[in-house]
Amino acid sequence: MRKRTLKSDRILLGGFYVLLGIFSLICLLPIVLAISGSFSNEVEIATKGFSLVPRGFSLDTYKYVFQSQGDTLLGAYGVTLATTILGTILSVIITTCFAYVISVKDFRHANKLAFFAYFTMLFSGGMLPWYLVCTKYYHLGNSLWGLILPYSMNVFYMYLIRNFIKGLPYELTESAKIDGAGYFQIFWKVVLPLSKAGIVTIVLFYALTYWNDFYLPLMLVNKDEYYSMQYILYIMNANIQYLATNPNGMGAGHIVLPTQTIKMAITCIAIGPIVLVYPFVQKYFVKGVTVGALKG
């Protein structure tokens, strides 16, 4: 009976691995097609379609992107990198501090603050009031802070960290109090080191939010020096689409525009840094999501 059970468990485990492998390939396929398409010839793509291997290997698309918008794209990369680094650091500090405060049992206003944060997840003032507050009262228009502060705390990520902190053994903080540690010392020397997996998880979430954002530049910025990379790529893609549909109006009637391959190149430029960074934080990401979601 036991051998049958072990055999059935192995078969079930093998089936799970097969399904996981198929799902992984499905998720990986668009990335491979994007990379292959970005190095393909536009004519080959138009006639034969996309493939896993570049058709008519060519760097013309990347040359077109960097020659036409090279300086602008480089400046946008700097803006995006600055907002991602500064915004992620600021957001993690605010999120972890708020999560720790509402997880302290001795703080009598913890539930009120938690409800206030939760209330903002359910109700919003709308786009127009948000825009007026950001531009008329906070003066965030055409500034680097306008690309950082609106995303400075995500309530869902805050609850993720709060659940992670509440899952820590209560005896640890109590023993620290007995030893004379204050709340800040407990937070800095006990809570933060033990919450590393959860913090790395929200670091990745916030970094992705800032890196992929083009909404804030679209709403709050009208100066080139504050455009993010995603917004520049969005404009480039829109311009290419316009030239493709109106070639004569722009004097491009005899030019083969890389309309399809440029989409793939833009995708690769946008996701490249994140794909390179993710493997280094993947183990913390999985642990942080599972533990933070279940504890508390």
Image (cartoon, grey):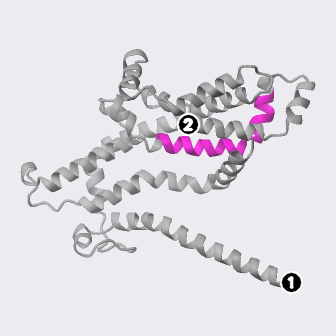
Instruction: Say the numbered circle drawn on residue 1.
Output: 1
Percent coordinates x, y for residue 168 in the rendering: 80, 40
- In this rendering, the answer to whether 240 lies above or below 21 is above
Q: Residue at x 74, y 30 (%)?
A: 103
- In this rendering, the answer to whether 222 lies above or below 19 is above
**Given the current orientation, which residue lies at the most extreme top position?**
137
Closer to the chain start, of discs 2 and 1, is 1
Of helix, strand and loop, which mostly describes the magenta segment?
helix
For label 1, count other residues whose C-alpha is less than 10 Å away and answer few (under 14), some (14-19) or many (20+).
few
Q: Quadrant of residue 11?
A: bottom right
Which amino acid type is shown beneath numbered disc 1?
A: Met
Is 67 covered by the magenta stretch? no
Percent coordinates x, y for residue 96 in the rendering: 66, 32
Q: Which residues are magenta?
A: 186-210
Is 193 covered by the magenta stretch? yes
- In this rendering, the answer to whether 284 lies above or below 101 is below
Which amino acid type is shown beneath numbered disc 2?
A: Thr
Comparing 226 with 134, the one in front is: 134
- Residue receiving disc 2: 88
In the picture, which quadrant includes the C terminus?
A: top right
Disc 2 to disc 1, C-alpha distance: 54 Å
Q: Is residue 166 left or right of residue 251?
A: right
Percent coordinates x, y for residue 121 in the rendering: 54, 33
